[in-house]
Amino acid sequence: MESSDCHTNPKPSFSLRQLSRLNQSIHMLLMVSIIALPCNMVLLTSPTVAQEIAHPSLNKNNKIIYVDPQDGDDEQLGKKSSPLQTITQALKIAPVGSTIQLANGTYSEKTGEKFPLVLDKQIIIQGNPQNQGYKTIIQGDGYFISPTGAGQNIAIAALKDAGSIIGITVTNNHSRGHGIWVESASPRIVNNTLTRNGNTGVSVNGKSSPLIENNYFYNNLGNGLLVYGTSQPQVIKNTFEQTGFGISLVQHAAAKITDNIFDGNRIGIILEGTSQATLRHNEVINSSEAGLTAIAQSHVDLGTDNEPGKNIFRSNHKLDIQNATNNEIVAVGTEVQGDTQGDISFEQGTFVTSKNSALKDLPPLPPLPPRRDLVQPTLPPVNPTEIEPAPANLPAPPPVIANSTGDKELVFSSPSGSSATSDVIPIPYPPTVSSSSAPVKYKVLVEVLDDGEADEVRSLYPEAFETILQGESWLQVGAFNNLAKAKQAEQNLVNLGFATYLLE
């Protein structure tokens, strides 16, 4: 590391390692102090949705059914000491209000699963929320007849009174495969990874109102999230990365899209039909075509006088925003650094919904915390396992969709020479290092005391390497141009008990 990183200020009286250890001790002391507060004081701070459902203790009054694909047996009772083997069996016996707790492993036809898995009552399927389902993998596909989209190939169907899907990785290798199919239901889909689905990570259909929060959509060949019909999802704090289209809204869908990151997709967000979207606090970067594209009679609200958008569009290779409709896009408070096309107003204005819009019927979003530079809530540590790195060369994104979808499924054909199918599919760890072409501004360092700790860090960050700072040895796990991503990586390590240092 260059000396200019270190000698611009006088040498501190404490070493960086001492300061890092001191900071960790203070953090733990604060946590103990919070636990010791009177109950009426603790209740003043309400957990977010993602925080609440990530803690099994908050569901302590519910029945928990344990499943383990390696050591379980469907003839057992589903207790912690005698788990079931399949989610299929757990769904058959789980009463309303229960939680199906999944052990690490791959749940597939080889382990006895029958696809699609159908969640149609208030049940929680939960893996590991802390790491967005890394190594808790549901991989498979099955035929499903949708009342609104004809025959589909899906891994999980969320229907009727579907509850929550939390902390799992979902992969459907079929060339037209959907990971999670939501049909006229309102489940909570939180803290998951949707990756290498042949068509779409999450498809929302009919008249659905799901909460889609803090998920990682990575390398899905068609869409990360596809919304049909008159569905009205709330899409909060997700990452859409290296996917054909991050979010596609078609027909009469209406979505509130808040505090998400779109990085390295073909198109970040695309709207068609009479669909509508309200975007706030999103970052759309590095798209190979456009950051946002609106066609047909769609409407987009990127910010108004009363509620500035605070969206950021940058480093999108062709256009930041493309408006191919006859409707003006109001974008007060939205920042663009590249070219735009069409009728877009960055001055004062008011967004006008279409006459038959479903957007006006959406309930207001609950208050959100400040953007991602806020330290994430501390979650219980997990035992890290070895990561199989994702391939360096990703398949090309699918072709651009036509302007009219009708009432049928949007099908994306895999490019020639590539396939979503594979017997062994490496699952990416949730995003850490930004792929942006902007200069690196932040480096995350971690202290390791022995080879065992170094191996543990490298199991999470295979590219970590040793570096020297102020005469002390550290592992650098990542270099970032985005402070939020740097702090996310730092917090992941703090949660595992490591001392870290963020170098700016």
Image: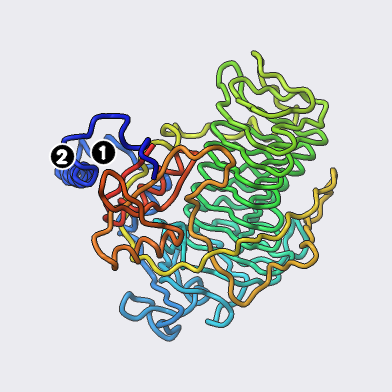
Left or right: residue 501 versus residue 211 is: left
Amino acid under disc 1: Leu
Q: Residues within 10 Å of mark 2 (few under 14, many from 20)?
A: few
Q: Earlier in the sequence, mark 2 or mark 1?
A: 2
Crowd band around label 1 with a 10 angstrom C-alpha radius: few (<14), some (14–19), many (20+): few
Occupied quadrant, residue 127:
bottom left
- Marker disc for residue 38: 2
Report, in whole angstroms, how far the alpha carbon at label 2 lies from the one at label 1: 9 Å
Q: Is residue 98 visible?
A: no
> Residue 397 location in percent, x, y?
73, 54
Q: Which residue is mark 1?
A: 43
Residue 322, quarter of picture = top right
Left or right of residue 320, residue 120 in this image = left
Percent of width and height locating residue 124: 45, 60
Looking at the image, which is closer to me, 247 or 488? 488
- 452 with respect to 410 (left or right): left
Q: Amino acid at mark 2?
A: Pro
Judging depth in this view, the residue of 493 and 268 nearest the camera is: 493
User: At which x and y percent is residue 37?
Assistant: 16, 40
Query: Is 428 positioned to the left or the right of 504 in the image?
Result: right
**Farthest-out residue, top:** 348
Assign a secondary structure to mark 2. Answer: loop
